[in-house]
Image (cartoon, rainbow, N blue to C red):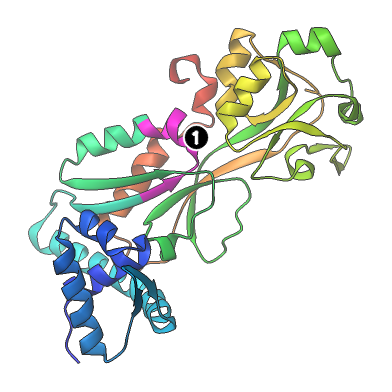
Amino acid sequence: MRYSLDEIETFLAVMELGTVTAAAARLNLSKSVVSKRIADFESALGAALFRRNAGRIAPTDAALRLAAGMRPALAELRAAAEGAAQTMGGPAPLQGTLAISAPMSFGILHLGPILARFAEAHPRLDLRIDFDDRARDLAREGFDIAIRIGDMRDAHLMQRKLCEGRMIACASPLYLKRHGTPAVPADLAAHQVIGYSHLPDARLWQFHGTGRSEAPQVTARLTLNNGEAMRDMALAGLGLAMLPDFIVAPALREGRLLQVLAAHETRILPIHAVWPPISPIPVKLRALIEHLAAALAGGRPWNQPDKA
């Protein structure tokens, strides 16, 4: 049984991206080369990894099991090689690829400039950045690192807290003039609120105080899947919104949105970098984590006007 590292990397790229065409584009190869590598890998293993039908491919159960075992093994192999190179040859330019996943609004508003500085400092390193509010499966989808906001639920991932935000209940002056200002969370039942499709209303509209949590009854007429779009609906006077301070801080400073129910505590949003458990950690990944931690040190940089 003989197979090459190139064949393994090609196999994992096809598994991640779902098509030979996409894998060829990612690897800067022709489709015929990708197909041959997959065929040679299958021949070496003596097992079919993909079902082929009318130009489409789908992974077999064997491929799914193989990929689950090979992804972390390949990551550790790369990390060991990079570490050896650093030890033998001294500090070397970072190179290779880092795949990064982050929530869309946080990524666009705050992470983009930070990653741009990192990319400028390391011109031989390729960054693949995916902004999406869904929590991506890092190992299965081929991501090296993700930014996660909120309570951590992936106990198997390594993590480092970067900073934290807070949820803010707010509305436009126009909305409050027309509909009044809620005095207590229970008043929200009589108001229009803006919902977030990735989170149930009972989790979005949470308040804390006097030793207990409260999730008042609300009804969302408008439900969106992006925080900036929710903010824009609130700015238009269409309802109350519960949004992270990293999205609404500028509008609050400018008076275009007003905080409501400020006496009632809302959820803290810890912001973490998370990555699969790899030992040793790749040099390029460690460098990115340190860069993110330094850039976001000091609490909530978006609350500072010069960093908004």
| Residue 247 pos. (x, y %) | 56, 26
| Residue 191 pos. (x, y %) | 85, 24
Name the quarter where the N terminus is drawn. Answer: bottom left
Q: Residue at x 63, y 28 (%)?
A: 230
Depicted 3 relative to depicted 182: above or below: below
Q: How many marks?
A: 1
Q: Residue furthest front?
A: 54
Residue 177: which quarter of the image? Answer: top right
| Residue 44 pos. (x, y %) | 21, 88
Residue 282 visible, this angle: yes
The residue wearing badge 1 is 106
Task: Let me know if residue 105 is in the magenta part.
Answer: yes
Secondary structure under tag 1 reads helix
Task: Let me know if residue 30 is in the magenta part.
Answer: no
| Residue 108 pos. (x, y %) | 43, 31
Taking the image as shown, residue 39 lies to the left or right of residue 273, namely left
Taking the image as shown, residue 42 lies to the left or right of residue 177, namely left
Q: Residue furthest left?
A: 89
Q: Amino acid at mark 1?
A: Phe
Residue 30: which quarter of the image? Answer: bottom left
Q: Residue at x 42, y 81 (%)?
A: 65
Magenta-colored span: 100-112
Q: Residue at x 37, y 49 (%)?
A: 100
Residue 245 visible, this angle: no
Badge 1: how crowded within 10 Å, few (<14), some, or many (20+)?
many
Residue 203: which quarter of the image? Answer: top right
Q: Residue at x 54, y 29 (%)?
A: 300
| Front-lying residue, 84 or 218 | 218
